[in-house]
Amino acid sequence: MDSSPRLETATLVSREFRAPGFWFLKLRCEHVARHARPAQFVALDLPGGFAVRLPLGIYTAQDDTFGLLFKEWGERTTRLAALPEGSQISCIGPLGNAFAMPRAGERVVIVAGGLGVAAFWMLVKELKEASIDTTIVLGARSAPHLVGREELAAFGFPFEICTDDGSEGHRGTVIDRLRSLPRADVLYGCGPGNMLQALCGLADKHGITCQVSLEETFGCSLGTCWGCVVSVRRGSGQATGYPRAPGESRDLDFARVCKDGTVFSSAELVWAS
Amino acid sequence: MTGAPLDLRVKIGAATLKNPVIAASGCYNRGEEYAQIVDVGRYGAITLKSVTRSPRLGNDMPRVFPTPGGLLNAIGLQGPGIDHFLAHIAPELSKVPTAVIASVAGFSVAEFAEVAALMDGLPNVIAIELDVSCPNVDREGQCFAADAASLAAVVGAVKSRVKLPVIPKLMPNVADLRPIAQAAQDAGADAVSLINAVRGMVVDVANARPMLANVSGGLTGPAIRPIAVHAVWEVAGTVSIPIIGMGGIETGNDALEFLFAGASAIAIGTANFRDPLVHVRALQGIEEELRRRSVASVRELTGMARTTQAKAGSH
Ligand SMILES: Cc1cc2nc3c(=O)[nH]c(=O)nc-3n(C[C@H](O)[C@H](O)[C@H](O)COP(=O)(O)OP(=O)(O)OC[C@H]3O[C@@H](n4cnc5c(N)ncnc54)[C@H](O)[C@@H]3O)c2cc1C
Ligand SMILES: Cc1cc2nc3c(=O)[nH]c(=O)nc-3n(C[C@H](O)[C@H](O)[C@H](O)COP(=O)(O)O)c2cc1C
Ligand code: FES
């Protein structure tokens, strides 16, 4: 079967309340579930007169069913959380590129902030199958916001939990915690922008390979509107490759998070200082 | 005439489209992304993203924000510039499974004329649309589409350089669209497209700052549809050249509103993002209407609401 994205109808098979405002939904859609790669996402068309689809990371994927782990951020996610089981949802996926696997014997640390954890179930599963030494650093504002570890814990890798308020695990950020861990060969990150910027900064400083899955406000989710770009180094394989604009002195080009990403290597990203 | 084949062809100047449903500029690239999931060849034409003379990086992020029934965008004409376009993108146009309308944006009359001339004769390209919503650097930043004289200068200059039909694209942020459309026609435009995005803004209340890096943006999607339908109605009462109507079209019924108001063809932008089959639905809606009214040609639908209104008015 062709793994390119398709326009499908998914059926909502179960909805699980995780914490106030946090949900874990399972949707039946064989094409997405069978072909999803780590960090890929779906774009859902929700009822309610919205002009654009809602992008959500594919969390779990097993047999003909995939899972979504999300927060009620605004109107579309709130609408999704309220849909009854059995609902049919128009779904485009799987979309975006994927995390690349480490080489055998490399040590991996995964750093997830908040809902960024949703990008990692498939990666953790593949790391387990490849017997890669992996540590998972999870951070959230406070203990109730530490959603997603239920599913990840099943793989048996060690966890480092961090909360801003110290309500569980270490008080402080995932980056603080990472600094005190043994050096990794490969870092993977997903979460808030400032966390990823710090992670990439740390990786570059120590010369560690680092891949991050980014999030932006999406329009089309498919690569046609150019609304979701991120700055990357000129010449980066994911960039437009367009000639430099007149008067542009910065050594940067843009890439589309939805189509060229969502995964970028820290070596390619250019962060605003 | 039930059972008779329906004639969906429409004429835009000397160009003929196989059907009146067009993908709007800036929303579809060359169709290659959508081709993964739907039959983009069902479109009567695909309009390319507007190309400028020089490469442009475009605006900073955030560039888009969803609004009630719409999308606010400020992409800032990110693009390769005409040289890179000719070298790398133009050769791919023969693979587009339908007709292509090229789009040119510019900041001076000379830039429009020069870039449009280079687009003339590219494979598959059947017309050239002019995105005239940019500021005119020769006239103190006055937007071409807001000033009849600037617009006429652009259209006249492009017409003198290209053989293909030329379609200036009007924007709704003007006091009166009619003299502007008239100026376009008088300067030799073969058709007009309308409307471009409606200027708008969202404030990020939590952080007390504009939501888009560019501060303002263009509002598109169903939120602007009545504005667009009215614009078509007004312009159709003024000019005799064909109108390509657009702004918030999501269904066959929406498409018919534009045709009945006076458009000869319609374009769909934002609705592709939510419903990649929107073009097929629009076409089906038009076909059903032709059958329901026992009309053979889509061309007979153009301005139907005007005829009805004129009759009602004469009593
Ligand atoms: C590739 C990708 C994958 C993603 N995966 C996940 C995931 O797995 N789980 C998850 O929970 N999220 C995920 N997201 C994030 C999610 O798609 C966004 O948060 C999305 O905007 C939510 O849509 P919404 O309509 O519910 O909220 P929106 O209405 O879009 O609001 C989003 C945020 O903006 C704020 N906002 C809205 N309007 C205003 C205003 N006028 N002023 C100030 N603030 C405002 C809201 O309060 C909210 O915080 C992902 C995003 C991307 C791009
Ligand atoms: C993301 C985006 C980018 C656009 N870029 C262009 C452009 O480059 N040139 C242009 O003439 N119109 C551009 N438009 C305007 C559309 O072509 C169209 O006129 C407008 O969106 C109204 O139609 P819609 O409501 O169906 O989207 C853009 C619209 C969007 C949403
Ligand atoms: S959201 Fe449209 S290009 Fe990425």
Image (cartoon, grey):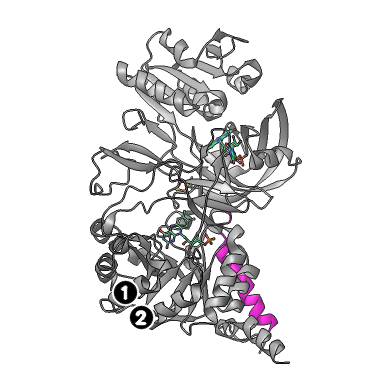
- Which residue matches tag 1? B153
On the question of residue B246 being in view, the answer is: yes
The tag on residue B187 is 2
Q: Is residue B53 left or right of residue A185?
A: left
Q: Position of residue A15 (x, y in %)?
A: 72, 33
Q: Is mark 2 within 8 Å of ligand 2?
A: no
Q: Nearer the viewer, residue A51 or A148?
A: A51
Q: Position of residue A72 (x, y in %)?
A: 66, 34
Dot 1 and dot 2 within a common chain: yes
In the image, the segment drawn in magenta is B274-295
Q: Position of residue B67 (x, y in %)?
A: 59, 49
Magenta stretch holds residue B240:
no
Q: Is residue B250 left or right of residue B38?
A: right
Q: Residue furthest bottom?
A: B315
Q: Is residue B261 left or right of residue A182?
A: right
Neighbor class of circle 2 (other Cα within 10 Å; few <14, some 14-19, many 20+) is: many
User: What residue appears at the point 48 percent right and 80 percent down from the top-left corner?
Assistant: B242
Q: Quadrant of ligand 1?
A: top right
- Please identify the dominant SS of the magenta region: helix
Q: Please report, as a chain letter, where disc 2 is located.
A: B
Say whether marks 1 and 2 touch (CB < 8 Å): yes
The earlier-in-sequence mark between 1 and 2 is 1
Alpha carbon distance from label 1 to label 2 = 8 Å
Asked which secondary structure carries label 1, the reply is helix
Image quarter hosting the C terminus of chain B: bottom right
The tag on residue A103 is none
Q: Tag 2: residue type?
A: Ala
User: What residue appears at the point 52 percent right and 26 percent down from the top-left corner?
Assistant: A120
